[in-house]
Image (cartoon, helix red, strand yellow):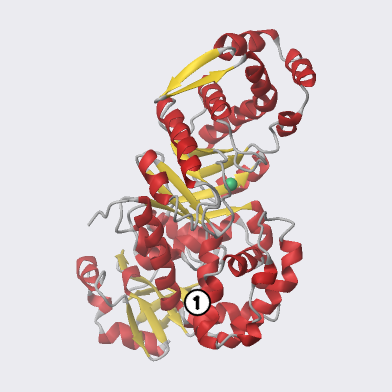
Amino acid sequence: MNNLINILKNNNLLTKEQNELNKLKNNKKLYIIENDVKLYKNSLYKKDNILFFLAKIKYDKSLYLFSKSKIKSDFKEKINEIDSLFFQKVSLSPENAVILKKLFPFTSPISLRDKKTTIGCGDRLGKATPGHIRAAKNYDIYPVLAQQSIRELNFTKRSYSNVTGDVVFLVFQEGFEKGYGADGDHLKTIADIDVALKAGMPMITLDLSEVMNAKAADWEESQILKEFDKIDKNTKDRILTSYAGKTFTIGKNDIKISEYEAKKCAVIYNAALDFAKVVDNHLRKNRGDKYDLEISIDETTTPTLPEHHLYIIKELNYRNVTVNSLAPRFIGEFQKGIDYIGNKNEFEKQYIIHCNIAKANGNYKVSIHSGSDKFTVFPIIGKHTNLRLHLKTAGTSWLESVRCISMCAPNFYRKMHKKAFEYFKEASKFYHITADLSKIKDINKINDKDLPKFLEQNESRQLLHITYGGLLNDPELRTDFFNILSDNEDLYYELIFKHFTKHIEKLGIKKTK
Ligand SMILES: [Zn+2]
């Protein structure tokens, strides 16, 4: 603590007003580092004569409040006094994040419905946010910094209040005032949505895969007709007059929906679309107009046909559902953490149709799930959406943390790498990947300096990508893993920054300054 107080005194931080503190920010040196203390300069804020900032002493990162007069604060931690200097060391807990959000509203996630381009930066560790911010802040794009699915919460043993809380403090660390989103990803029930809403998440990705009757896609015609007949008469009549045998001109394409296809769509989707309306009402009741609803139909076994996309959005519009973004499943493979697999030209042809459907039916954002690392199709994705899009990434930030480990702690990386093979079988029950692990070279024959190459090869990337749950919960790995990342925080932020800058540039997004 004495070292920290010396930094404050040596730099006259306690006497500086906000405008003088701001002059210390945004230059090349982001930190004041002395002895074992690292003070994050962009987090220097003065409010009611209290100096706020984040600092790390060894592995202990905390929020600090310092003042020459007595401190009144809602944080529960003890207020200390040394030489008529008052201070409070505040832990980075979810409860304290709620208090910080009230003090500094820019640390709260907001609705990004009126923002044209957004990028989901799922971060399973709660550590990567500064890298994401440093990439996004220079471009015409808004980051969704907190984003996790229930599956990821289970694997990482985190809660939505952990996920949002971690981001709140890291947004404060960076002094990032531009605004950011938070996404309760792939939620399927009102109960789960309520947990995300309670944690202050304005974006909800509603996964319709379980409420829709997906198996009807493979039914015999007679079964479809029988099921369609069970629908109430008014709805049946409306579906038939609206779609059966109709041709819709969308951009340069004609999309024809036959009578049978209209009936089939009703059988597959109507219950799910009714549920989307229930969810939309629920969000409006809880958040007024400040929410972003994403409709996700990407977790299906077959690509979304343009006819089905059109039917879904028209029916959502009929129900007055406020669609901020919609995630179809595209042709080809969008596997986790690796580039697009499939025919690029065929992808482009179909992608144009999906984009034109979106433009003609409310101009919602087209959302790309498993969007990380799809470098060969990013230019196509950027171009045909006119950048009205949401790109969702998750595990790729975790892979950058593993890259960081491979560069600065080779022996520890070797341990992780070997354990990943042990966890692979279990993990592959939850993630669809096609990696042939026999193509991964024997790590015992690889030099330390070549270890980061495992993060370049698809097979080893996928192995490391999906086994995060096992690796993070392994008692032999967990503590050391986080300590190594903490020791090498700047390299980690730099790797995330570079990786996300590459995503943003390939999409064709312009710099703002
Ligand atoms: Zn998805």
Left or right, residue 321 beside residue 509 = right
> What residue sits 72% from the left and 15% below the top?
231
Q: Quadrant of residue 477?
A: bottom right
Residue 161: where, in percent of width, then height?
57, 57
Position of 255 relative to 327 (above/below): above
* Secondary structure beneath label 1: helix
Residue 490 is left or right of residue 159, and the answer is left
Q: Residue 96: tell me if it is visible.
A: no
Above or below: residue 331 compared with residue 361: below
Q: Nearer the viewer, residue 205 or 252?
A: 252
Q: How far across and down, in percent of the image, does residue 326 sit?
A: 51, 37
Q: Which residue is mark 1?
A: 404
Q: Is residue 439 above or below residue 256?
A: below
Q: Please say if 193 is above or below 172.
A: above
Q: Does residue 242 appear in the picture of this structure? A: yes
Residue 151 is situated, as x and y percent measured from the top left of the image, at 67, 54
Give amino acid for label 1: Cys
Residue 86 in the image: state x and y as whole percent: 38, 78
- Left or right of 127 on screen, residue 476: right
Q: Nearer the viewer, residue 300 or 289?
A: 300
Asked which quadrant contains residue 500, the reply is bottom left
What is the crowding at mark 1: few (fewer than 14 residues within 10 Å), some, or many (at least 20)?
many
Name the quarter where the C terminus is drawn: bottom left
